[in-house]
Amino acid sequence: MKNVFEPVRVKGKLMGKNVATGQFATMDQIRHIQLLNAEKNREVLFVSATGRVTRVPAAEAGDATTPPPVMKMSFLQAKEAQDPSEMFKNIERLTKMVGRGLQPSLVITGGAGMGKTHIVKSTLEGMGLQ
């Protein structure tokens, strides 16, 4: 892969140097903040054909021939990983914020019979609000 860059300092200026060719990245290819973060965390930068920049730990990058691991989670995977008790704790916590006036409103959605109204009602009653 030719689009792997490592952060290097040349005469005090931070630049992205191509690991394979040794050429420097153009100013519009990699943003300065991306270089700073990569330098601080000892990472290399993969630049895709679409221009998307992904930081990967230098040890994982190896010889820079493998693409970065996919970090995205599908909607179904995220939904399966949800813990209902944690979700209801969050609804209760957010309802308390509205009851205390920290937030102006709260929108809660979900299927019928889930217990949304019960949680909100019991939380507000517990705060002395109705």
Image (tube, helix red, strand yellow):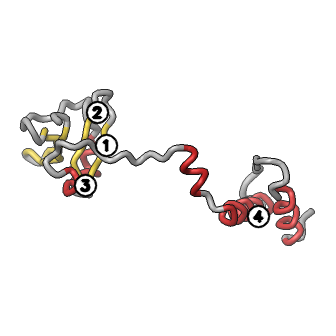
- Going by the numbered disc 3, the residue's amino acid type is Pro
Q: Which residue, given by chain and number where applicable, does mark 3 sit on?
A: 57
Residue 16 position within the rendered picture, expressed as x and y whole percent measured from the top left: 17, 41
Closer to the chain start, of discs 3 and 4, is: 3
Q: Residue at x 29, y 47 (%)?
A: 55
Q: Which residue is tagged 4?
A: 96
Check disc 2 and report its element: helix, strand or loop.
Answer: loop
Q: Where, quadrant-wise, is the C terminus in this rendering?
A: bottom right
Q: Is there a contact, CB below 8 Å, between mark 1 and mark 2?
A: yes
Cα gap from disc 2 to disc 4, whole angstroms:
44 Å
Which residue occupies 31% across, 38% down? 53
In the image: residue 28, left or right of residue 105: left
Q: Are marks 3 and 4 in contact (CB under 8 Å)?
A: no
User: Do the numbered discs 1 and 4 sit on residues whose CB atoms are within 8 Å?
Assistant: no
Q: How far is disc 2 from disc 3 in space, using C-alphas?
A: 17 Å
Q: Secondary structure at mark 4?
A: helix
- The tag earlier along the polypeptide, 2 or 4, is 2
Q: Name the amino acid type tagged 1.
A: Thr
Tag 2: residue type? Ser
Quarter in which the N terminus is drawn: top left
Q: Residue at x 83, y 66 (%)?
A: 123
Q: Secondary structure at mark 3?
A: strand
Residue on which the image places disc 2:
48
What's the CA distance linking mark 3 and mark 1? 10 Å
Which disc is residue 54 wearing?
A: 1
Q: Which mark is residue 5?
A: none
- Where residue 85 sits, quadrant-wise, is bottom right
